[in-house]
């Protein structure tokens, strides 16, 4: 029996028959979801979750497994071994600093369907744990364009900015904001990350519309990093900007 689904239905005042009508299936099908623990098809999972105001992963956790593109897996492995990560993002907040709701909104804006979005969100949260919850987490320095702070609905961005402020309270997490008044700068060409290690050369990561790639040619990235870091606000002023967030109503 799916006790979570049954409880969610009770809280919303839904019966097997009423939920079946809302989702567009036979009541016997809905009954199997509740009494036998059967897993609905992806479109029905999404419809039920929306009707009950729950996440798909809450109702059917086994149906939502972390998903990570094959091309990204080498970098995810690199992240877990780096001693320092230097990340620049011009348009969205870095994946390592995203809340679940923010990650869901970003990923859902692309071509992924509901179940795929949930799986990628789960993978992103797992990445964060693998980096930040290590016994010796790396020094992570993020430079983010102010435009990324201003993009998103207030109900998503307020908790997201609260999360950023919480994260920068950690000694190993630093965030610098490039103010819009800085104008044009080389970082607007795209996001990148540089990973450093003890006893080996730096490695870079570049992202684009189709996929991402790992590169050992980090010299151009480091030159851009020096520039964006130079035009970014100091740490304390960056935190003040995130806390003020006067653009959110």
Image (spheres, rainbow, N blue to C red):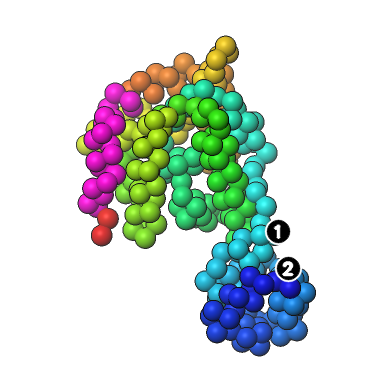
State the extent of the magenta-drawn residues as a range. Answer: 228-247
Residue 220 showing in the rendered view: yes
Residue at 60 percent across and 75 percent down: it is 7
Reply above or below: 197 against 2.
Answer: above
| Image quadrant occupied by the N terminus | bottom right
Nearest to the observer: residue 87 or residue 220: 87
Front-lying residue, 193 or 139: 139
Q: Is residue 128 left or right of residue 119?
A: left
Please report the residue visible at 66 percent of the width from the left and 60 percent of the height from the top: 61
Residue at (36% x, 37% y) in the render: 169
| Residue at mark 2 | 39
* Residue to which mark 1 is pinned: 62
Magenta: main secondary structure equals helix
Give the quarter of the image for residue 240.
Answer: top left
Q: Position of residue 171 (x, y in %)?
A: 39, 30
Contact (CB < 8 A) between labels 2 and 1? Answer: yes
Asked whether residue 70 is drawn in magenta, I would say no
How much space separates mark 2 and mark 1, taking CA atoms? 9 Å
Q: Quadrant of the C terminus?
A: bottom left
């Amino acid at each position: 029996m799916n006790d979570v689904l049954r409880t969610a239905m009770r809280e919303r005042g839904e019966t097997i028959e009423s939920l079946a009508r809302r989702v567009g299936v036979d009541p016997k099908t809905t009954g199997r979801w509740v009494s036998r623990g059967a897993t609905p098809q992806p479109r029905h999972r999404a419809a039920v979750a929306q009707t009950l105001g729950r996440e798909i992963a809450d109702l059917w956790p086994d149906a939502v497994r972390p998903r990570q593109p094959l091309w990204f897996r080498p970098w995810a492995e690199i992240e877990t071994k780096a001693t320092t990560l230097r990340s620049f993002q011009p348009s969205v907040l870095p994946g390592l600093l995203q809340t679940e709701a923010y990650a869901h909104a970003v990923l859902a804006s692309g071509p992924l369907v509901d179940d795929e979005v949930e799986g990628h969100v789960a993978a992103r949260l797992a990445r964060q744990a693998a980096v930040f919850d290590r016994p010796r987490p790396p020094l992570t320095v993020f430079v983010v364009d102010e435009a990324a702070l201003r993009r998103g609905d207030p109900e998503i961005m307020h908790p997201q900015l609260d999360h950023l402020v919480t994260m920068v309270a950690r000694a190993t997490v630093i965030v610098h904001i490039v103010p819009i008044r800085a104008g044009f700068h080389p970082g607007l060409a795209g996001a990148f990350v540089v990973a450093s290690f003890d006893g080996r050369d730096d490695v870079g990561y570049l992202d684009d519309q189709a996929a991402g790639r790992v590169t050992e040619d980090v010299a151009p990235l480091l030159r851009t990093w020096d520039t964006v870091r130079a035009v970014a606000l100091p740490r304390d002023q960056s935190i003040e900007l995130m806390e003020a967030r006067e653009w959110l109503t």
